[in-house]
Amino acid sequence: MFKPLALSVALLVVSTAALAQSKPAAPALTPVQQAQVQKQDAQMAQAALQVAQLVDQGKTGEVWDGASAIAKQVVKREAFVAQVDADRKQVGKPLSRKLATITRNASSGGATPAGYYINVNFATRFANTSQPVRELVSFHLDPDKVWRVAGYTLR
């Protein structure tokens, strides 16, 4: 079963906010902050890989069970499982998965519920596709300072 990723985020929240803003005058990260971001990237990539592997195994319901309350408000379990499983059935069995990017976003609300997000993108080759597909696993920083799944999509 997928377990939420608990991280020490006090300083990383400040770093995440600084990274999410695209202002050119934003201060550069210190070497300590850079090391923390790299460590967090590795942890989030591993957590996203676990999510993708659960979907690979047909355990999509377990992904939803461990998801953020934000995700559970947006989509019901049955709808999430049905959509993800239908998308995955269409593309077929995964053949290879390569980490592409990790991005950070802060939302003040609107189309995306307010909060901090980390998005992990994989370039994944599937049996029924000729080109890699973007496999996106999103995480939300919940009020208890735990990163939990906020979404899974293929694009």
Image (cartoon, rainbow, N blue to C red):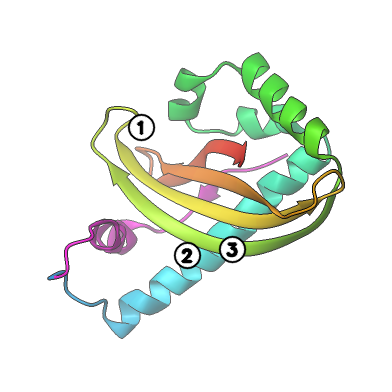
Q: Residues within 10 Å of mark 1 (few under 14, many from 20)?
A: few
| Residue at position x 70%, y 46% in the image | 52
Secondary structure beneath dot 1 equals loop
The residue under label 3 is which amino acid type? Ala
Q: If you read the primary sequence from the N terminus, does the residue marked by circle 3 or circle 1 appear first?
A: 3
Query: Any mark on residue 100, and which?
Result: 3
Q: Tell me the CA gap for discs 2 and 3.
A: 16 Å
Residue 132: image tag: none
Q: Residue furthest bottom?
A: 31
- Between tags 2 and 3, which lies in front? 3
Instruction: Report crowding for label 2: few under 14, some 14 to 19, many 20 or more residues within 10 A (C-alpha).
Output: some
Q: Residue at x 46, y 56 (%)?
A: 7
Quarter of the image where one finds residue 76: top right
**Mark 2–mark 3 contact, CB under 8 Å?**
no
Q: Secondary structure at mark 3?
A: strand
Question: Residue 112 bears which disc, if any?
Answer: 1
Q: Nearer the viewer, mark 2 or mark 1?
A: 1
Residue at left 62%, top 50%? 134
Amino acid at the residue labelled 1: Thr
Q: Which image quadrant: the N terminus?
A: top right
According to the image, label 2 marks what residue?
40
